[in-house]
């Protein structure tokens, strides 16, 4: 993956392609964390954009209004999001199935309403400007595409490395156990409630960091980042790339961010084509893009 990210700029011929790659990398950071929750722990979240938006608005308010250093604001936002996820996750994660989905949906809508209505703090529906990101004394504006690409690539590699190590740890084995059967995991000595809460908090921190970086890169943030459709996009990226596949989550994010840009040639039929492609992928590649591709390669070997 490091090699791919290092070679990819050779094929990014202009600023537009850099912009698409950066947005794909930012989305992938959030999706890698969400994949830990959905793919490995088997817990659905339809309000994860709320954590993404809280990270974005946290950095925007602390840097723009209170003059905090951007990196300190990013860490503080992630800490607040982790605390909120801990407090909210304890009662919510006692639910299962459709009830859990509805609870996380309600949480996301609540965050969206608060951010939209608190005009004095967040700017309301009009959004608010976000200062440039300052990294070790170097200010990165939205026009510094190559520098931003390098930063996002490093952050994505770190996010994937942490996720892979977590999956290979006792925590990861416990998550796979409760995904298979919560009753069997509990009988086997796994504290189901504790591990659900741990992974919920970790996935929220992933989303918060991605939101903060996205806000600084765009230079402007609106409540759309917290909206329900954004949550659905994140879940779709997990499913499209392949649940319980960390690299699949990265592939799913990259495809779903880049594909609409290439479908603009169809003009009014862009959304129709996108929907048809997603349906075809789910019918013929049921395990997701990357796991299904690996299965096909293995099946062709003698």
Image (cartoon, helix red, strand yellow):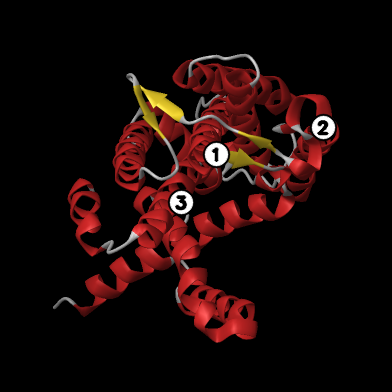
Quarter holding the C terminus? Answer: bottom left
Q: Is residue 291 left or right of residue 269?
A: left
Identify the mark nearer the N-term, 2 or 1: 2
User: Which mark sits nearer the N-terminus, 1 or 3?
Assistant: 3
Circle 2 sits in a helix, a strand or a loop, which is it? helix
Q: Residue 23 carries which label?
A: 3
Distance in Å between CA atoms under marks 2 and 3: 26 Å
Residue 101, percent across and down? 73, 47
Side of 45 where 132 appears, left or right: left
Q: In which quarter of the image is residue 9?
A: bottom left
Query: In x, y percent, where is residue 160?
Result: 34, 40
Vertical position of residue 245 compared to residue 133: above or below: below
Of 208 and 146, nearer the camera is 146
- Point out the residue furthest to the right here: 117
Give the structural element (helix, strand or loop) at label 3.
Answer: helix
Residue that appears at 51% across and 35% down? 216
Task: Give the percent coordinates (x, y) of residue 22.
Answer: 40, 50
Q: Name the residue under label 1.
A: 219
Which circle marks residue 114 in the picture? 2
Is 38 or 7 nearer to us in this picture?
Answer: 7
Which quadrant of the view contains residue 187? top right
Q: From the viewer's perspective, is 19 left or right of 232?
A: left
User: Within 10 Å of the Cα at label 1, are there few (<14), some (14-19), or many (20+) other Cα atoms?
Assistant: some
């Amino acid at each position: 993956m490091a090699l791919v990210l290092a070679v990819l700029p050779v094929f990014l011929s202009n600023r537009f392609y850099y912009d698409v790659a950066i947005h794909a990398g930012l989305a992938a950071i959030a999706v890698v964390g969400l994949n830990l929750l959905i793919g490995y722990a088997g817990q659905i979240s339809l309000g994860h954009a709320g954590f993404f938006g809280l990270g974005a608005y946290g950095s925007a308010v602390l840097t723009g209004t209170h003059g905090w250093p951007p990196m300190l604001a990013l860490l503080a936002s992630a800490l607040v999001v982790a605390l909120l996820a801990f407090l909210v996750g304890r009662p919510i994660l006692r639910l299962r199935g459709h009830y859990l989905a509805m609870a996380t949906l309600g949480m996301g809508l609540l965050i969206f309403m608060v951010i939209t209505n608190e005009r004095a703090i967040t700017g309301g529906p009009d959004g608010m400007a976000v200062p440039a990101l300052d990294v070790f004394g170097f200010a990165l504006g939205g026009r510094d595409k190559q520098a931003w690409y390098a930063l996002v690539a490093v952050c994505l590699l770190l996010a994937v490395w942490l996720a892979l190590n977590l999956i290979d740890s006792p925590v990861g084995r416990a998550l796979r156990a409760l995904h298979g059967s919560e009753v069997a995991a509990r009988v086997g000595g796994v504290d189901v409630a504790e591990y659900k809460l741990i992974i919920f908090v970790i996935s929220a921190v992933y989303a918060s960091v991605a939101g903060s970086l996205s806000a600084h890169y765009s230079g402007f943030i609106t409540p759309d980042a917290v909206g329900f459709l954004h949550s659905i996009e994140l879940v779709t990226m997990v499913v499209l790339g392949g649940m319980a596949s960390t690299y699949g989550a990265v592939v799913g994010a990259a495809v779903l961010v880049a594909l609409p840009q290439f479908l603009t040639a169809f003009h009014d039929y862009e959304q129709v084509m996108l929907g048809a492609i997603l349906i075809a992928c789910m019918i013929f590649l049921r395990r997701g893009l990357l796991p299904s591709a690996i299965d096909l390669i293995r099946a062709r070997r003698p």
